[in-house]
Image (spheres, rainbow, N blue to C red):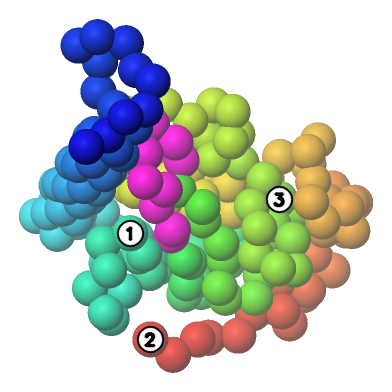
Amino acid sequence: MDFENSAPNQPTMAEQAKLNGSASVANTQSVTKRLQSELMALMMSPTPGISAFPDADGNMLHWIATIVGPNDTPYADLNLKLDFQFPADYPYSPPTVLFKTPIYHPNIDFSGRICLDILKDKWVASYSVQTVLLSLQSLLGEPNNASPLNNEAAILHEKDFEEYKRKVLARHVDLDD
């Protein structure tokens, strides 16, 4: 018998732990359902230049994505791989997104971390994997040089675009799937 202090008609700590455990399972199921819905949308209505799928192990909380660099940018036709890690409270918190492909860009550091407001404080639950990928594709052509993670790239993008393009191509390495 559970003899801990608790208010009448309130669950004991042991009962609360069981409830929290079932809430966690329900939350994981909710996240998985949302991600399955997003995956289906990506597959049924593909957007040119972007794709994303759960990892090779089928882990719905870990996706691998690809962006094809947009035309009329130094990234044109480059294949860029990204890693998505979804939190347990997705879509109420943003995924953690990293570029796996080495990239030279003002808003992406050499570890692949991204400075993009919708992945931080401007995230809203209505955003999706597709929203993030389209925003990143747009960022490739229109960097925010006022908020750089790579200061050198921001300066070169503004002052010596030819050298910037050279560094973009020199840093790029195609990654195998």
Is residue 173 something that shows in the picture? yes
The residue lying at 66 percent from left, 58 percent from top is: 113
- Residue 120 as seen in the image, left or right of residue 6: right
Closer to the camera, 145 or 89?
89
Dot 1 falls on a residue whose secondary structure is loop
Dot 2 falls on a residue whose secondary structure is loop
Marked residue nearer the N-terminal end (1 or 3): 1
Q: Amino acid at mark 3?
A: Asn
For disc 1, the marked residue is 61
The residue lying at 25 percent from left, 15 percent from top is: 10
Compared to 160, does 3 lie above or below? above
- Residue 127 as seen in the image, left or right of residue 69: left
Compared to 57, does 123 lie above or below? above
Magenta residue check for 19: no
The residue lying at 60 percent from left, 85 percent from top is: 173
Mark 3–mark 2 distance (CA, rounded to whole Å): 25 Å
Closer to the camera, 2 or 110?
2
Which quadrant holds the N terminus?
top left
The residue lying at 82 percent from left, 56 percent from top is: 150
Marked residue nearer the N-terminal end (1 or 2): 1
Report which quarter residue 85 is drawn in. Answer: bottom left
Magenta residue check for 90: yes
Q: Nearer the viewer, mark 1 or mark 3?
A: 1
Crowding at label 1, few (<14), some or many (≥20) Cα neighbours within 10 Å? some
Q: Amino acid at mark 2?
A: Asp
The image's mark for residue 107 is: 3
Query: Is the C-beta separation of discs 3 and 2 under 8 Å?
Result: no
> What percent of the width, then of the height, locates residue 128?
32, 41
The residue segment tinted magenta is: 84-94
For disc 2, the marked residue is 177
The image's mark for residue 96 is: none
